[in-house]
């Protein structure tokens, strides 16, 4: 068995600065052990290529329920698929390329958080956001080595900290909270050999003052940087070591543990395959390789896990898996060239996707069956019309 977990990359470089050289502790992580418990030590092994194709399937047998929230605003939000978090009371925290907004559970724009700029309460390079429900803080990662804290309930700026890496100069690609300590974790990708040599760790723990206190999840290989961290239904955060590592990790209440392994059998990316010329990763060669790789966009409800996969020749495949009975379905057309539905968030019951004019682009008989279902149900979004956040509840019992 050769589980492979890799995630697609964007190339935004965000580096920390050198601080004082002080020894930090090793994070205690529940490591993946394929030999233990019948190869299922990390919770579940998801064998995606064994799942039932959904092409031509009647989605009314698979989609149990749909809920819709219209994002009511006159603002030009851009692509709100960038990052979307769910608050405990259903609030929607949306990160765009240059702003962070909060919408009510019924789609009304309530507040914004900071703005682009160089002031104390502003961010120069809006990298990522995370929600600490324990403290009520929204954490904003500025790619210029800062983390800003905002009151999630009011939008008020509380404070900012400059990251003290304790002797290292590393990337800051994503953030997720440590709700037990009041601190946070920073995810650092590795797109160049120099970054691999600088530190083999991908996760770095900081205290509430921004001082690095621990590091973990070692990987002596390229690790990619597109959406490596996603919020789960219970405000745990799903973490992908986006390289050749075969495990999906989950973080919550100060602990990081293995959650899922992705198994493509002999169709997965070989561990010794190289995709670099000189110092940098050749992303084009990677995505065009004749293998299933780059598992990304992992979303989790209480009963369902969904994820995207880059297949041979950069074809996209989207999978939905039932935790209850182990059944699964591939939502993408067989040729893999159709645009996937792409889920952007999850709560206990629903996987959420954005339905807007972009959803309609290239929509034909080859499109993802869920996209076709939504088009038939909601029709065409008019020019200038508000995007819809659509929650989908799946019942996979019919696909066994």
Image (tube, rainbow, N blue to C red):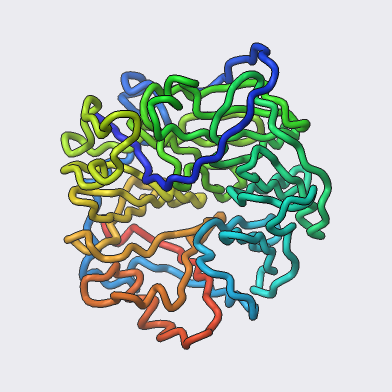
The mark total stands at 0
Q: Which residue sits at x=25%, y=41%?
A: 286
Q: Residue 301 location in percent, x, y?
A: 50, 52
State left or right for residue 184 relative to residue 83: right
Q: Residue 221 location in percent, x, y?
A: 36, 26
State left or right for residue 377 relative to residue 170: left
Q: Residue 207 location in percent, x, y?
A: 73, 28
Q: Say which of 21 and 242 sits in front.
A: 21
Q: Say which of 256 and 118 sits in front.
A: 118
Q: Residue 364 location in percent, x, y?
A: 25, 77
Quarter of the picture containing the C terminus is: bottom left
Q: Say which of 222 and 249 sits in front.
A: 222
Q: State which quadrant residue 166 falls in.
A: top right
- Asked if residue 383 is positioned above or below residue 144 in the image, the reply reads below
Which residue is outermost to the bottom? Answer: 382
Q: Which residue sits at x=25%, y=34%?
A: 275
- Asked if residue 79 is positioned above or below residue 71 in the image, the reply reads above
Q: Which residue sits at x=52%, y=47%?
A: 230
Which residue is outermost to the top? Answer: 23
State left or right for residue 110 relative to residue 63: right
- Asked if residue 63 is positioned above or below residue 240 in the image, the reply reads below
Q: Which residue sits at x=75%, y=43%?
A: 134
- Asked if residue 196 is positioned above or below residue 129 in the image, the reply reads above
Quarter of the picture containing the N terminus is: top left
Residue 1 visible in the displayed image:
no
Q: State which quadrant residue 282 falls in.
A: top left
Residue 231 visible in the displayed image:
yes
Q: State which quadrant residue 178 falls in.
A: top right
């Amino acid at each position: 068995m050769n589980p492979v977990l890799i995630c697609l990359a964007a190339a935004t470089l965000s580096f920390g600065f050198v601080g004082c050289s002080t020894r930090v502790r090793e994070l205690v992580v529940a490591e993946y052990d394929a030999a233990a418990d019948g190869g299922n030590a990390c919770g579940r092994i998801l064998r995606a290529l064994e799942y039932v194709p959904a092409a031509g399937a009647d989605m009314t047998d698979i989609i149990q329920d749909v809920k819709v929230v219209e994002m009511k605003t006159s603002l030009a939000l851009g692509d709100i698929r960038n990052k979307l978090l769910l608050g405990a009371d259903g609030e929607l925290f949306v990160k765009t390329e240059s702003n962070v907004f909060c919408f009510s559970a019924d789609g009304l724009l309530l507040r914004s958080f900071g703005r682009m700029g160089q002031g104390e309460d502003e961010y120069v390079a809006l990298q990522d956001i995370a929600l600490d429900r324990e403290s009520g803080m929204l954490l904003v990662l500025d790619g210029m080595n800062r983390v800003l804290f905002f009151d999630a309930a009011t939008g008020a700026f509380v404070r900012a900290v400059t990251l003290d890496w304790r002797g290292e100069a590393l990337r800051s690609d994503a953030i997720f909270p440590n709700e037990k300590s009041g601190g946070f974790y920073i995810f650092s990708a590795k797109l160049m050999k120099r970054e691999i040599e600088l530190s083999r760790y991908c996760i770095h723990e900081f205290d509430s003052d921004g001082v690095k206190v621990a590091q973990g999840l070692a990987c002596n290989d390229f690790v990619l940087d597109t959406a490596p961290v996603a919020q789960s239904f219970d405000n745990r955060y799903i973490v992908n070591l986006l390289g050749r590592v075969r495990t999906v990790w989950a973080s919550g209440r100060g602990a990081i543990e293995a959650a899922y392994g992705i198994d493509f059998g002999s169709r997965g990316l070989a561990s010794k395959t190289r995709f670099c010329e000189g110092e940098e990763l050749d992303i084009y060669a990677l995505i065009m390789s004749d293998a299933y790789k780059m598992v990304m966009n992992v979303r989790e409800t209480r009963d369902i896990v969904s994820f995207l996969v880059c297949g041979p020749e950069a074809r996209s495949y989207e999978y939905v898996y039932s935790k209850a009975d182990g059944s699964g379905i591939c939502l993408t057309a067989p040729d893999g060239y159709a645009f996937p539905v792409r889920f952007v968030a999850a709560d206990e019951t629903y996987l959420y996707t954005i339905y807007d004019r972009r959803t309609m682009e290239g929509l034909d008989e080859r499109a993802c069956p869920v996209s076709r279902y939504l088009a038939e149900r909601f029709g065409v979004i008019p020019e200038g019309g508000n995007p819809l956040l659509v929650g989908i509840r799946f019942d996979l019992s019919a696909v066994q």
